[in-house]
Image (cartoon, grey):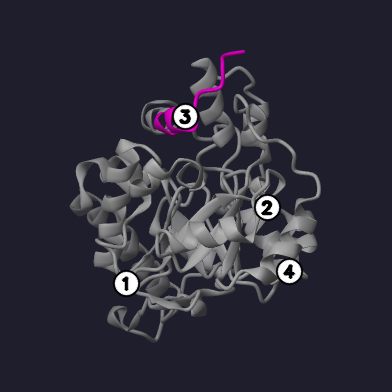
């Protein structure tokens, strides 16, 4: 077993693997292909009537779109985060930072998460691993993660499979529900709970129902498998091809969480690749969608490349909503059927 790399080295390797290796699911899809939008030949609206504006976490987004969590803590991460934040500012969409644990433990890494200078008005979401609540973190650490970058909210991520395959990973997930219940009332900002791409299902959603979470990111299987990323990082190949394909497909996770949490804002992520995917996710009950890995390569090219990618995505979403007669993302709800 290779020695565990330090956290900054690991983050750099994560980026390299995501750019150059096969890290997407091959045996599981998002499940969105099993649904079709309910087409309306007479939509009774004009294309220009479609308004993507979406209220979310106390901000008004110009579209139901978040740039998903990717990186931070090393030189390339700093450039990528600023580029993504600039694009988010230009388009009026949200942006979720990568895990900030490295920033809290190594102050020299803080600069790689500082994006408010280039994105003063966006919905900015910080990010920490929930398992850190079993490693000595408490409300003060969560407060620092938000305040030191000027974030509007904080995402706490769940990643047991990833941690189990990470050299030196944190795998003590026992008692986290109780710890989360203790911490949430002690922080003054919205908290999102999210997976990293292996999905949140009905059983977990039921346990989360009593908690005052601001939103849930189902982060289903079908896009990037972070279990695959870890095996590439530490072994240079996939050692356990079945293990790294474990997960709940995004569409299934979304349907199950919506059935248990009918009033909770949901983020759909995990293999959302097109505006039509996004329209289906909205029709299945998401308030917003998040996209991460497809934006990594454009981010290396600069803000203009990221803006072009997202603009094309949002154009497709607009046309898809028009085709089902939905003036707003909210009106898309239910306008979908099983294939």
The answer, for residue 215, to whether it is visible in the render is: yes
Quadrant where the C terminus is found in the figure: bottom right
Q: Which mark is residue 10?
A: 3
Residue 97 is one of the magenta-drawn residues = no
- In the image, is 188 to the left or to the right of 247? left
Mark 2 touches mark 3? (CB < 8 Å): no
Q: Which mark is residue 211?
A: 4
Image x and y of residue 210, in percent = 78, 70
Q: Which residue is mark 1?
A: 121
Q: Which residues are magenta?
A: 1-12
Image x and y of residue 162, in percent = 61, 35
Mark 2 touches mark 4? (CB < 8 Å): no
The answer, for residue 277, to whether it is visible in the render is: no
Query: Dot 2 surroundings within 10 Å: few (below 14), some, or many (20 or more)?
Result: many
Above or below 308: residue 26: above
Q: Which mark is residue 200?
A: 2
Query: Dot 3 surroundings within 10 Å: few (below 14), some, or many (20 or more)?
Result: some
């Amino acid at each position: 077993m290779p020695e565990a790399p330090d956290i900054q080295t690991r983050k750099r390797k994560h980026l390299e693997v995501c750019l150059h290796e096969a890290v997407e699911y091959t045996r599981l899809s998002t499940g969105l292909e099993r649904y079709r939008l309910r087409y309306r030949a007479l939509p009774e609206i004009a294309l220009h009537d479609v308004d993507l504006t979406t209220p979310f976490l106390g901000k008004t987004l110009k579209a139901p779109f978040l740039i998903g969590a990717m990186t931070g803590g090393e030189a390339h991460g700093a450039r990528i985060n600023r580029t993504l934040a600039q694009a988010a500012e230009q388009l009026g969409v949200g942006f979720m930072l990568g895990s900030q644990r490295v920033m809290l433990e190594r102050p020299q890494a803080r600069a790689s998460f500082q994006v408010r200078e280039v994105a003063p008005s966006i919905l900015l979401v910080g990010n920490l691993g929930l398992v850190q609540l079993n490693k000595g973190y408490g409300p003060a650490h969560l407060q620092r993660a938000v305040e030191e970058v000027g974030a509007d909210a904080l995402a706490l991520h769940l990643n047991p499979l990833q941690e189990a395959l990470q050299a030196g990973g944190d795998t003590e997930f026992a008692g986290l529900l109780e710890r989360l219940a203790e911490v949430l009332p002690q922080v003054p900002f919205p908290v999102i709970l999210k997976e990293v791409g292996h999905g949140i299902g009905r059983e977990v959603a039921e346990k989360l129902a009593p908690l005052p979470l601001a939103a849930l990111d189902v982060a289903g299987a079908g896009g990037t498998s972070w279990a695959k990323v870890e095996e590439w990082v530490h072994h240079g190949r996939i050692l356990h091809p079945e293990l790294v394909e474990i997960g709940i497909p995004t569409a299934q996770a979304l349907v199950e969480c919506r059935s248990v949490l009918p009033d909770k804002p949901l983020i759909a992520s995990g293999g959302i690749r097109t505006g039509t995917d996004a329209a289906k996710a909205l029709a299945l009950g998401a308030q917003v969608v998040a996209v991460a890995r497809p934006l990594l390569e454009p981010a290396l090219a600069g803000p203009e490349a990221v803006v072009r990618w997202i603009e094309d995505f949002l154009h497709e979403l607009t046309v898809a909503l028009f085709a089902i007669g939905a003036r707003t993302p909210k009106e898309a709800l239910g306008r979908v059927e099983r294939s």
